[in-house]
Image (tube, rainbow, N blue to C red):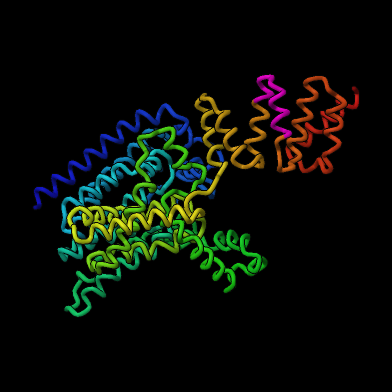
Amino acid sequence: MEKKLKRAMITTAAAALLLRLIYALLFSDTPLAQFNSLPGLDMATLLGFSEWDKSTWLNKPLFVLHRFVLFFCYIAMGKSHNFMLIYIVQSLFGVAASAFVVWGTWQISKSIRAGVIAGVIYALYGPFMLYECVALQESILTHTLAIGFAVWLYYLDRRSTLAGVISGVILGLNSSGRPATVLLALVMALYPLWLWRREKFAFLNVANLIFLAAVWLTASLFNGYFRGQFNPFFNVMPHLIEVHNQTAPQAQGAAGGSVVSYLNVLLGAVKNVPYHFGMREVPENLDYDVIRTILPILSLGPLFVMPFAVSGMVTSALLKRKNMTVLYIAVAALMLPLAARVPIGRYRLLMMPFFIIFAAIFIEELIVNRPKRLAMTGILIGVVGANLLCASPLVRSNPAAYHSLAIAAVKSQDDADSYFQKAWQMSNYTYKPSGIMLMLRFMQRGDFDSAEKTALQDKSNAPEFIFYHAVAKTARNRFNEAKELLQKIKNPQKLGALYPKYQQLSAFLQTK
């Protein structure tokens, strides 16, 4: 059994590595390779935060596993950012996690086949590979959580003190600086005390808890020394209160630390929970559903995995599979913290190791449990049907995703107009950044007809469109029409940085 398990782990890791080598060759020729360098997006921001040799407040060291990785990559490349090195490091975490998921699934199910199914799904799961190639922290945090969970299961199963120590350290590194996984880490550290509560107390019972606390203490001292804040975690609550107060009129104006504000965050999180169980990602700038159309190698995603995962959760509950309890605990501990802000796809990544294990065990059960196969198939069909009927958790239009892709395409000298046009149309002609970029690109090429058409499509009533429409008219010597357009701008100061150009154009037209 041990040899078969090791062979399964090695084979799965090799498949994950081969797939990532192929992916590296493919994505380097797409706009995706430029995402790390797009100003204003989280990738570029995090790269800046990792430059600890600089003396600004934002560049002060912070105890976050991902920032350690980015910092060491930065130093290794002579204080410069090499995106391929970041990709290699993060993908190696993914390869290791694929093997550990085989191990962890086997420890729960005692089925090597279920372990292989879980490991292969993990190795092929598109969003993991997508986020491994950018400088966001989700992939490393997800992979270390998967590894830490597998070691923690070994700690419980074999009563290994060393495994308890190692898993405590991994869970501590994973949760430091990331409040979303703090509750899960704490629950996993306390679980052995409850599990072995009737046995004689020993260091084994608290090995995980002690070393988790040791990492948190180290993180607190580290942050206190470098930043004057003796806290191992980000204080995200002020931001969460601000976000949720904007969407709840009854909470607007409530004090930052008031009970109403905290309750509003909790209610918002509860409202967002259903998004975790949907078949599609909720998009953002780096939109998986968009990118996989460019790179079909990423096709295995939540659309295929989540129906099996949710069916596995339902089936295991109905069949009273006690061995799955730890998976339910993990999902429950992550659910609300991850839904507290907005239910975007990359936040859900942290839950995917557990969903993948649920899915793999369900598929295994579907294969071997002939008496229950029909009922399980019915559950699967019901889950898919529920997703199709509940429209809102499935997909949310987000023109920013196509706009970001268009900017990346500009940097990679690819055809970007189709992406700008897609974002513009998707927003029903209200997403200002894409509309403005389209107008500017049309005018640069001398295509003033298309520029004016874009201005007329605008439904946002933004003064920038009127201004650039006037510029297009001026370029075609239609000065009177340009004057009439400028007169429609009631408050030119709202043009912001364009206001001086507005004044120049207005003065020029007065001479015509």
Query: In terms of depth relative to the viewer, which is nearer, 386 or 301?
Result: 386
Question: Residue 346 at what x, y percent from top left?
Answer: 44, 49
Q: Taking the image as drawn, is residue 224 in sight? A: no
- Tell whether 331 sits left or right of 226: left
> Count the marks: how many?
0
Range of residues picked out in magenta: 442-456
Q: Quadrant of the C terminus?
A: top right
Question: Residue 414 at what x, y percent from top left?
Answer: 51, 25
Instruction: Identify whether 487 is placed above or below 155.
Output: above
The structure residue drawn at horizontal position 64% and vertical position 32%, both measured from the top left corner, is: 437
Query: In terms of depth relative to the viewer, which is nearer, 244 or 370?
Result: 370
Q: Is residue 455 magenta?
A: yes
Query: In terms of depth relative to the viewer, which is nearer, 381 or 187?
Result: 381
Give the main secondary structure, helix, strand or loop, of the magenta stretch.
helix
- Tell whether 271 sits left or right of 158: right
The structure residue drawn at horizontal position 56% and vertical position 42%, both measured from the top left corner, is: 400
Question: Residue 442 at what x, y percent from top left?
Answer: 66, 25
Quarter of the view holding residue 328: bottom left
Question: Residue 147 at what x, y percent from top left?
Answer: 27, 53
The structure residue drawn at horizontal position 23% and vertical position 68%, both measured from the top left corner, is: 322
Instruction: Identify whether 143 is placed above or below 186.
Output: above
Quarter of the view holding residue 104: bottom left
Q: Is residue 70 magenta?
A: no
Q: Taking the image as drawn, is residue 494 in sight? A: yes
- Tell whether 481 sits left or right of 28: right
